[in-house]
Image: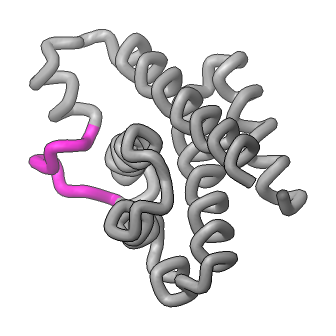
């Protein structure tokens, strides 16, 4: 794994431990994206690898390259990461305010902590999958 990818992995873990949940989410998604891009590139899917995480997940799904449960976790992570990485409108379904209202979870720290736990589970799932299937 490239040094940058390893550093992202370590920083995501540390961010969670120190309660920096948004950072943990964004970094876990970055690790997942690094892995998908590298995996697709190594299999000759260069175009799909260069088009972002959604395209990489879609390519892996349509070509049955990765277990569906890993793809589902990665895609969910992508959705909760996107409002932090790409500014979304106030009515976008995945922004924190909309998700808080929908889930009736009004403690932002609890929602972010739960999201960060899911993000790390997705990151570890990808890392484990990569190790087992290399």
Q: Quadrant of the C terminus?
A: bottom right
Q: Please report the residue visible at 60 percent of the width from the left and 85 percent of the height from the top.
A: 44
In the displayed structure, would residue 81 be above or below residue 125?
below
Q: Is residue 22 visible?
A: no
Left or right of 128 in this view: 10:
right
The secondary structure making up most of the magenta span is loop
Give x and y (percent) for residue 127. Answer: 68, 41
Q: Is residue 89 magenta?
A: yes
Q: Is residue 113 magenta?
A: no
Left or right of 86 in this view: 18:
right
Give x and y (percent) for residue 41. Answer: 64, 79
Q: Is residue 83 visible?
A: yes
Q: Please report the residue visible at 33 percent of the width from the left and 48 percent of the height from the top.
A: 79
Give x and y (percent) for residue 57. Answer: 41, 61
Q: Quadrant of the N terminus?
A: bottom right
Specify start and end residues of the magenta stretch as a single range: 87-95
In the displayed structure, would residue 12 be above or below residue 31?
above
Left or right of 46 in this view: 69:
left
In the foreground, 22 or 6: 6
Choose top left, top right, bottom left or bottom right for residue 13: top right
In the foreground, 100 or 66: 66
Give x and y (percent) for residue 71. Answer: 41, 48
């Amino acid at each position: 794994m490239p040094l940058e990818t390893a550093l992202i992995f370590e920083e995501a873990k540390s961010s969670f431990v120190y309660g920096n949940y948004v950072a943990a989410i964004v970094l876990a998604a970055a690790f997942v994206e690094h892995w998908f891009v590298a995996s697709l590139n190594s299999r000759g899917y260069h175009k799909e690898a260069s088009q972002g995480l959604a395209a990489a997940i879609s390519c892996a799904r349509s070509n049955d390259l990765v277990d569906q449960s890993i793809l589902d976790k990665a895609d969910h992570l992508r959705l909760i990461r996107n409002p932090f990485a790409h500014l979304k409108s106030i009515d976008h379904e995945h922004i924190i305010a909309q998700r808080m209202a929908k889930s009736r979870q009004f403690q932002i720290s609890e929602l972010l902590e739960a999201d960060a736990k899911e993000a790390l589970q997705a990151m570890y799932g990808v890392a484990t999958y990569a190790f087992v299937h290399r």
